[in-house]
Image (cartoon, helix red, strand yellow):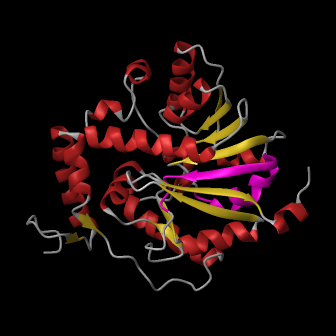
Amino acid sequence: SPASKGGDFRHVSSLSELDEIMLELDAAAAISDDELRRVFTTFAMKFPLDLPKDPYSDAYADRQFELYKYLHGKPYDTSNEVSVFDTQAAADRPFPFYTESPKTVGNHLIAIGHLIRTLNLPPKSSILEFGPGWGNTTVWLARMGYKVTAVDIEKRFVDLIAERGRRKKLNIEVIHGDFQLVHQVRRKWDAVLFFECFHHCADHRSLIAGLEKVVLPGGKIIFAAEPITDDFPIPWGFRLDGESLWAIRRLGWCELGFQESYFRDLMAGNGWMLNKHVCPETPWGVVFVATRSARGQDNLVV
């Protein structure tokens, strides 16, 4: 069957097959984080390619979220973006350190170092960071003296970052909120940062349309370690690799991917130009830096 347990890569074609693999993943996680990640790489689903032609249309988005509903079992809701953990324990040993994996820890640290180097902000700059999760980027940037505002939809992550900041005597502003903050606040920052979080935004077009409201003149937006690649087989939509299928089926998270050409066109249409910076030493080493294009500067309202 497509989900046979042999050494061959598995193309899953039904939810019953996927649920069998979910049990394999549970067993793998009980062994180690490395084993869990290995099994992630052994299966995927094929992308449905009979999509509406216009990736900006409501019909296209509707098809994507119908696929999500099929995979998860019920419609997407931002309340699904939940992570359960002990805040005090995580303050001592957050991801990636608790994995005890030299490969995962090393790749993560290299990715953050590449991000900070590419960000290249002057001292004391202000940063609006969305989806900081465990707060590793947040804490490192704050220790450099940057004024960081961290926004996360998960209250446990907000509390964790506050606790990590307290222990290091750092002045980190934490906000319990979501991506819609760009349409609600009346403040601007020198940079907006997305590190492994932009792909959780269900309405990514609305988010991008609102970014100009929160970036100071001459500022930048950073998309780091995001699934933006021309290897992606459709303009945008739910990823169907093993890890993404697990996150959607088991956790209900939003796991989008984007063709680089689509993403560049979308950003250009909103007045942003992109520069790509790649660090080949880590799988999370692609960083896109967005700055205002000539068109964007012409339309800029300060």
Q: Position of residue 209 (x, y in %)?
A: 75, 60
Q: Residue at x 53, y 18 (%)?
A: 163
Q: Is 298 positioned to the left or the right of 84 in the image?
A: right
Say left or right for 3 vs 300.
Answer: left
At 13% from the left edge and 75% from the top edge, which residue is drawn?
1
Residue at x-position 48% and y-position 41%: 112
Q: Residue furthest left?
A: 6
From the viewer's perspective, tell me whether residue 23 is left or right of residue 212.
Answer: left
Q: Position of residue 73 (x, y in %)?
A: 39, 60
Residue 188 position within the rendered picture, expressed as x and y whole percent measured from the top left: 80, 41
Quarter of the image where one finds residue 85: top left
Count of labels in the image: 0
Q: Nearer the viewer, residue 189 or 22?
A: 189
- Compared to residue 169, the image places residue 158 above or below, namely below
Q: Is residue 167 above or below residue 210?
A: above
Q: Is residue 86 magenta?
A: no
In the rendered view, would you say 264 is above or below 90?
A: below
On whether residue 226 falls in the magenta region, the answer is yes
Residue at position x 34%, y 31% from top? 97
Of 209 and 261, the residue lying toward us: 261
Residue 258 x/y as whole percent: 52, 67
Q: Which residues are magenta?
A: 202-227
Image quarter of residue 243 = bottom left
Does 88 sit above or below residue 197? above
Task: Tell which of 169 and 159 is nearer to you.
Answer: 169
